[in-house]
Amino acid sequence: MATPSKFLPNIESPNQKGERGKKTPRGKAPHSSGRPRPLSKAPLWLLLSTRSSLSRTGLPQNRRRRRKKTQEEEEEEERATSPPEMTSPVFLWLLFLTCSQIGVGGRSPYQAVLQHSRVRGRQQGPNVCAMQQVRGSDKKYFANCKQWYHRKICNQPTVVTYECCPGYEKIPGERGCPAALPLVNIYQTVGAVGASTTKMYADRARLREEIEGPGSFTFFAPSNQAWAALPTEILDALVSNVNIELLNALHYHMIRRRLTSEELKHGSSFTSMYQDYNVHVHHYSNGIVTVNCARLIKPDQHATNGIVHVVDRVITAVSNNIHTLIDVDDDLETLRTAIAAAGLNELLQGEGQYTVLAPTDEAFRKIPPETLNRILGDPVSLRDLLNYHILKNMRCAESIVSGTPMETLQGTVLEVGCDKDRLTINGKAVVGKKDLLATNGVVHYIDQLLIPDSAKTLLELAESSDVTTAVRVFAEAGLAGRLKGSEALTALVPLDDAFVGKSPSRSGPDWASLTPQPWTGISAADGRKALSHHVVKERLSSKSLYHNQELETLSGVKLRVFVYRNNLCVENACLAAHDKTGRYGTMFTVDNLLTPPTGTIMDVLKADDRFSILVGALQVAGLTELLNQPGALTFFAPTDAAFRAVPQVDALLRKHPQLSAVLKFHMAEGTLVRGGVGSHTRVKNLLGDKLDLGMRNYTVFVNRVPVAHGDLMATNGVVHGVDQVLEASPPRTELEQADGPAASLRSESGSFRDDRLFQQVLQSRSSRTVSVAA
């Protein structure tokens, strides 16, 4: 029976109370019958198994004795230790197989990453593994594919080092690590793999006899650095009572069976040798294995009577669930009250493997009181807020080496990453205390409240997005009250770039330069009406929109929806980001200011003095009725400048049949706004011919003529002004790119322009090789 510990929690049954203070007899294991287990003959697989060892070069000590290196010397050393280019077909094939099979098949993620490290180190000799060491620290990792190419761990640069793979050692004068290490007992193994402090404490606690003798154990041995990192008061409490406190602490690091890294499955628990307390194992997809959130830095060190896994911290027993951890911490009073109000006590007391990002009281105080009171007073928003702080899976801090998307109980995703020694949430270093382990998960403290979109009003959605100009303009137009209310609305919020050089009317001011007293030149009512076009009366989802759907705005204007292969647009404004769904409304981020139609195509042309010649031509050609009737047309309308550039334009304007054909050549069926044009789009004009459209450098081209004035919206279509009368496009060559004309490689006759060069290419050695291969 193990002795109760101040360092480790204790659970006693009634019949155990009388045994308090008794020491575990030497030669007997806790909870055993007292009879030593006989030493069985080691099987052949055990004799052939291997274990890793420290590098015999004494590099850490040598580094401490050397003078501090200059930056130039460090860069030179990195170049010298950087891996050579390995491009042989065999190596590349092995590398492909290794990277593509990580986490699949029968191998564990750790074994797959270890194999990748062996492949990367094979050119250094047999049984050499490539390691990535964080520059300026002792942290080392077996290299997976992603880390190898990025050369960063937690945003810190890494240096590639080469060490003997687990179970092998160097032989002086020979390349690589050709010698397999001999098997010894756990006591000797612990001292040989960088845990000499654990070996020393095993002597003091009189554990040596147990781990030298018969049996089969798994020992999670803290490294020397792990013991040094313990708070002084805890370490003093352990070493001042070695027969009870220290012995119990070491027993908690032991399991009465041999467990390799393959058997340390994700989410598994095993009974320790301290009062049957469990240790909790997590085996992550990136190859990192933790026990009670301590990382296994040297797994699978085989011994004759078991196996040793070196860990990077001293582990402590776990007895409390997440709810209890939060309940006893004075810094989490607001969170504790919110959890009770949302009815989440039962969830955090029950079984599971959660990660709770616990906002401190200070984090709650950073939120504006109006917003915080609204959320705390709304059960739906409050529950979404708290579930947004709970990850579905348990993630210890040591398992995170780069940004990783993780799903919350609220249903959305947070990116959990790291920057140096701090955890980050969505790129922000907001995590304070970390790895408070509970029986049903782990708690990390954060100093910033995370508010999900589903708990925000429309105005708060906009304020948390890159649409600062729109937020200001909506407020100045007096619409902030509608956007932060509980009304079901959809806001079409333009990006900041959409306001540059734009105004509510053609003669109005620049919206991007509005002051706190805006609307110089127009009335506040006109400004409010213009912005009211951007707010739809119902709550929508972009996934439910369909072509030619009509949406009614706060101003009473009807907006049309246009669905294209590459875009989804409402009038001339196309969606520039995914929907943001708030508590009561939805926000669509759009790339342009909405200009609802005010009349037919003919009305638009008559109201714009740039098309005065065109208006007269349409009347001569008898096409005014066509452009006034209901329907959907796209008109690439020649401006006055375009007509003036046409030779003998006066004669053309007097010829009714020819003029009608020229104008119909500029009209296409359907409504095509600028956002619906892809790299190569074709439409049919009213004569049955094809018009080729493309987008280059944010400019739309039609038959290689740039559109000078786009998206003039009309009730029966759209007008795009062009400064050149369109002509039929020349035939496109096979090698011409879709985004614009390219220099043709062939002449009109169809042959290459340089026949002599073409014949030389055909007769070249490379050409013949390709032909034979084909």
Image: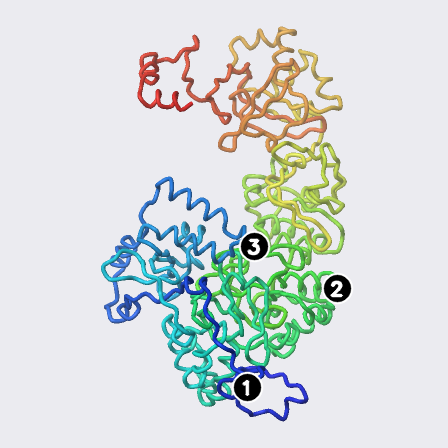
Q: Contact, CB < 8 Å: mark 1 with mark 3?
A: no
Q: Secondary structure at mark 1?
A: loop
| Badge 3 amino acid | Pro
Residue at image position (34%, 45%) is 86
- The residue that disc 3 covers is 405
Discs 1/3, front: 1
- The residue that disc 2 covers is 379
Q: Is residue 307 visible?
A: yes
- The residue that disc 1 covers is 5
Q: Secondary structure at mark 2?
A: helix
Discs 2/1, front: 1
Residue 520's place in the image compared with 711, above or below, is below
Where's residue 652, x and y in %?
58, 8
Q: Contact, CB < 8 Å: mark 2 with mark 1?
A: no
Left or right position of 5 against 51: right
Q: Which callout, 2 or 1, points at the residue further toward the start of the chain?
A: 1
